[in-house]
Image (cartoon, helix red, strand yellow):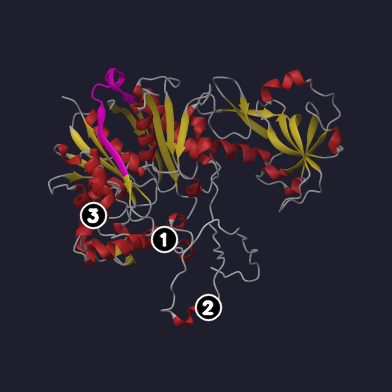
Amino acid sequence: MTDTASSEPAPIEIPEGVWSQPEVDMSAIEEIASVESVRSVRAFASLTYDYTPGLATTRFLRAIKEKRLVGERCSETGKVYIPPRGVSPVSGMPTTEQVDLGLDGTVVSFCVVNLDFTGNAQEIPYVSALILVDGSDIPIYGLVREIPYNEVQPGLRLKSVWVEDSEMTTSFENIKWWAPNGEPDVPASELADYV
Amino acid sequence: MRDVAIIATAQTKHVRSATTVNEVELIQPVIQEVIERSGLGRHDFDFTCSGSSDYLAGQPFSFVMTLDAVGAWPPISESHVEMDGAWALYEAWVKIQTGHADTALVYSYGKSSPGDLPRVLSRMTDPYYEAPLWPTSVDIAALQARAAIQAGVTSEQAMADIAYRSRTSAAANPFAQLTTSAQPLALMDEEYLADPLRRHDCAPITDGGVAIVLAAGDKARSLCSRPAWIRGIDHRADGHHLNFRDLTTSPSVRIAAEKAGVANGPVEIAELHTCFTHHEPILRSALGLGDDVEVNPSGGPLAANPMMAAGLIRMVEVANRIHSGEVSRGVAHATGGHALQHNLIAVLEGEG
C-alpha cells in the first residue's frame, strides 16, 4: 500500500448544495488537525497463473511452431474452428478431427486504428482485421501491413508473414502480420456467413 | 409455488490438477453426461445457468468459452453467476417459478490449479482495508477457528475427528479426491498450517465441475422415477467486513434454514459446504441439526472442493440419495465468501 503523493489525482470539484454532511467532532483527538488527510490509496495487486491451453489448443500450438495452422472440425456441422478450444460451439460436442489449413486468408472485416494506446508498438494508423484463414469457418484477428490503410477492404486476399524459423515458438506471435498476396478480391457475397 | 426437482446429475472425478484440459474440455463431458441422463435433448432446455469465476484460472470471460459445451446455437436463454453453482441453481429455480421455463440445465466448474488459490481468494475481501493486507482464505479461516474454539463451539480434537470421518466416508465416493486419513490422534501431531488449523482441517485444492437438470411438476415425474423435489430454498448473507460479524455463529444460515423449512420434517442427511473442519459445528448449530444427523456422507468438501462447484455438489449428493431411494429428506448447504459469509440452504425430498 502506497500513499501516492507524487501522482495525486486532481481534487474533485463538487458544486455547492449537492449534498450536506455533518461536521465530524474530532476534538477528542488532539493531534488530528495536524495530520494530512489521505486522499487516495493505491494498493498494488498481482497474481501469477500457469496457462493451461488444453488438448485441442495444445495441438494447435505445437503445429504453429512448425509453421502450420491446424483447425478442428465439428462432426455435426462440418465447420472448422481456429484456434480450436476442444468443443464445437454449435453441437456442444468435442472436436476430434484436426484439419490442416492454408497460410493465406481473406479480410472479412477490419478497422483502422488511430489511437496509440498503452503498450502498443505499432505506428498509427494501422489496420486490425478479421481474417478468414483458408479452410476455416471462423475469422481470427490479425494485423494488416504492406498496403496503405485506406486500400484495405473486405475480400482482400492476404498471406501470413512469419518470424524467422529460428524464432518460432508455440505462440500465435509467430505470425508477425498479414500482407496482400496479389490474388483478386473475394466477392462480398461469399463472406456473408462470416461477418 | 411450482414443484421443481433435480432430475439428473453428473460430476467430474475431482483432482488436484487437471493439467491437460482447459475449462471447456473439463466441463463438456459432465454436461454431455447430465443431458443424456435427463432424457432431454440438447435443445430441450428452456433455460441454462452456470457458475464460475475468472479469477481461478486467470482466464478472462472463461464462462463464455465454456458455453461452447452447451451448444448454444440456435440462440438460447442463458445466464451466469460469478458464484457457486448452487446460486445458478437458485436463479434457474426462480426462472421456473416465474413460469418462463419448465426445464433448466445448471452447471458450474472451477479450475483452481493454474493459480495460487489462497492468495486468489484474498481478492474477495474489501479492497480498502483488508485486500491490501493479502489475507489468504486459510488465514481468515484460522481467525474464525480460533474464535470458535475460544467460544467453546469446537476443539482441535473435534476438528480432527471431523477430518477423519469426512475422508474415510469419501472412500465410498468414486468422485472424491481425498479418500483416506490418518487416525485423529495422529492428525493432532501434525504441524499447524495457520494456528489452530492444520493441513487436515482444510479442504483440498481441486479442479472439477458438476451439472444438474431441473424440471417442474409432471415434466419432472415423466423424466425421473423419483425426483428430488426442492421443498424449500433460501439464501442470506452476513456482513462483508469480518469485523462486522461474530464469526462463531451464522445468523444467515439460521435465517435461511428457517425460510427453507429445515425444521418442518426429519433431516436424514445433511450435505454441508464445509471448506474447513470448524465450519461443521457452526453450521450444525445454526441449522439446528441433532447429533444423530449424518453430515457429509459423501466426504464433503474436505474430500473434494472444486471452487464454484462444491456447493452445487452438496445438492447433487443429497439428490442422488433421494433418486436411489436411500433417503427421503435431506438438507444441502452452499457457501460463498470468506468464513461462511453468504449461505444457501435447500431442503430436498422424495415422494412415496
x%, y% of residue A150? 85, 35
Is residue B220 covered in magenta?
A: yes
Q: Is residue A88 above or below residue B122?
A: above
x%, y% of residue A168? 71, 46
* Label 3–label 1 contact, CB within 8 A: no
Q: Is residue A15 above or below residue A154?
A: below
Numbered tag placed on residue B136 in the rendering: 1
Kind of residue at badge 1: Thr
Residue B299 shows up from this direction: no
Q: Is residue B176 above or below residue B156?
A: above
Observer-nearest of B188 and A177: A177
x%, y% of residue B316? 30, 36
- Judging by the rendered image, the residue that carries numbered circle 2 is A35
Q: Quadrant of residue B200?
A: bottom left
Numbered tag placed on residue B2 in the rendering: none
- Judging by the rendered image, the residue that carries numbered circle 3 is B282
Q: Quadrant of residue B130?
A: bottom left
**For the residues marked 1 and 2, what is the alpha-carbon distance in whole angstroms?**
32 Å
Q: Which residues are magenta?
A: B215-235
Observer-nearest of B72 and B166: B72
State which chain disc 1 sits on. Answer: B
Residue A176 shows up from this direction: yes
**For the residues marked 2 and 3, what is the alpha-carbon distance in whole angstroms?**
43 Å
Kind of residue at badge 2: Val
